[in-house]
């Protein structure tokens, strides 16, 4: 199940929902919650705005969950991602995976969040205390981490502009 | 989806700010590829040239330079994603 929403979420309620969906089968549920942090070094952040591509976001994340289910022995997964205006420290993303055993669920959960960061079409715009705004740039480390799962090129091959 | 011999082009995040639009219909009389269409985009919006890494999606799927673009398609232009 994949949900993209502006509203905050209740992580323990989401865990409980996944537990109900896999009752009697799951021996483990592994979950990850991401929080808004200060993306600019040495500059205080006041808020973050998340833009997204409706439709493609849900498609991409659903495909990642399907890939995880093919690759690891898991029972079910649940992803919630927020969009819109978010304050420092607020919850931004939740990923939970249910499995018979913990090892497969841990790996699938880490894969989903890593791959989401380089494939799901969300963009963060940070507003600093002095009012300046900038779009957060994708971290090279994130792309390398996704590539380390050997899921192919992280987000298609970046298209270099022709020299002017 | 754009009708007839056109595509619908969507712009996101910083690309939308630079272009000054979120979407537009774009004439496309015949099928092409991402690599062939990109110079048209850069000719209409030379201000995109300084952006080091543009990415495209065709019909909501990440595209590569040889991905086909056909009339009626939805083409999205954006920078590398930063969710999560």
Image (spheres, helix red, strand yellow):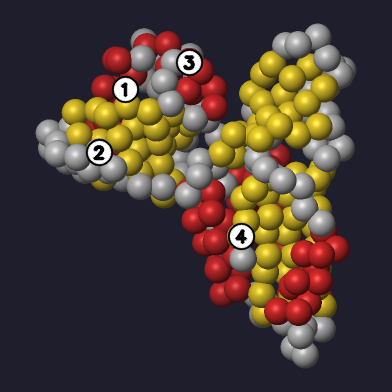
Q: Earlier in the sequence, mark 1 or mark 2?
A: 2
Can you identify the residue that label 2 sits on?
B2
Q: Nearest the camera: A131 or B36?
A: A131
Q: Which quadrant of the figure has residue A76?
A: bottom right
Which one is closest to the eye, mark 3 or mark 1? Answer: 3
Mark pair 1, 2: CA separation: 17 Å
Q: Is residue A9 visible?
A: yes
Do discs 3 and 2 belong to a common subunit?
Answer: yes
Crowding at dot 4, Cα within 10 Å, few <14 / some 14-19 / many 20+, comes out as: some
Mark pair 3, 2: CA separation: 23 Å
Label 2 marks which chain's residue?
A: B
The image position of residue A115, as x and y in percent, is 62, 52
Q: Which mark is residue A2?
A: 4
The image position of residue A123, as x and y in percent, is 61, 34
Residue at image position (33%, 41%) is B74
Quick check: marks 3 and 1 in contact, CB under 8 Å? no
């Amino acid at each position: 199940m994949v949900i993209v929403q502006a509203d905050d979420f209740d992580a323990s309620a989401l865990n409980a929902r996944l537990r109900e969906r896999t009752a009697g089968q799951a021996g483990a549920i592994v979950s990850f919650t991401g929080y808004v942090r200060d993306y600019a070094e040495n500059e205080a952040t006041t808020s973050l705005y998340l833009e997204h591509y409706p439709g493609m976001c849900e498609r991409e994340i659903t495909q990642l969950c399907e890939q995880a289910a093919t690759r690891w022995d898991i029972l079910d997964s649940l992803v919630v991602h927020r969009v819109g205006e978010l304050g420092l420290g607020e919850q931004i993303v939740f990923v939970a995976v249910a499995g018979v055993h913990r090892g497969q669920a841990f790996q699938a959960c880490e894969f989903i969040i890593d791959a989401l960061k380089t494939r799901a079409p969300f963009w963060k715009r940070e507003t600093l205390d002095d009012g300046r705004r900038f779009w957060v740039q994708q971290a090279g480390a994130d792309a390398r981490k996704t590539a380390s799962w050997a899921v192919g090129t992280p987000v298609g091959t970046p298209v270099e502009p022709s020299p002017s | 989806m754009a009708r007839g011999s056109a595509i619908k082009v969507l712009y996101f995040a910083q690309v939308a700010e630079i272009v000054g639009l979120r979407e537009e219909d774009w004439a496309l009389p015949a099928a092409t590829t991402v690599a062939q269409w990109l110079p048209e985009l850069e000719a209409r919006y030379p201000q995109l040239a300084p952006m080091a890494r543009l990415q495209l999606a065709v019909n909501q799927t990440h595209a590569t330079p040889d991905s086909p673009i056909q009339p009626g398609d939805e083409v999205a232009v954006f920078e590398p994603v930063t969710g999560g």
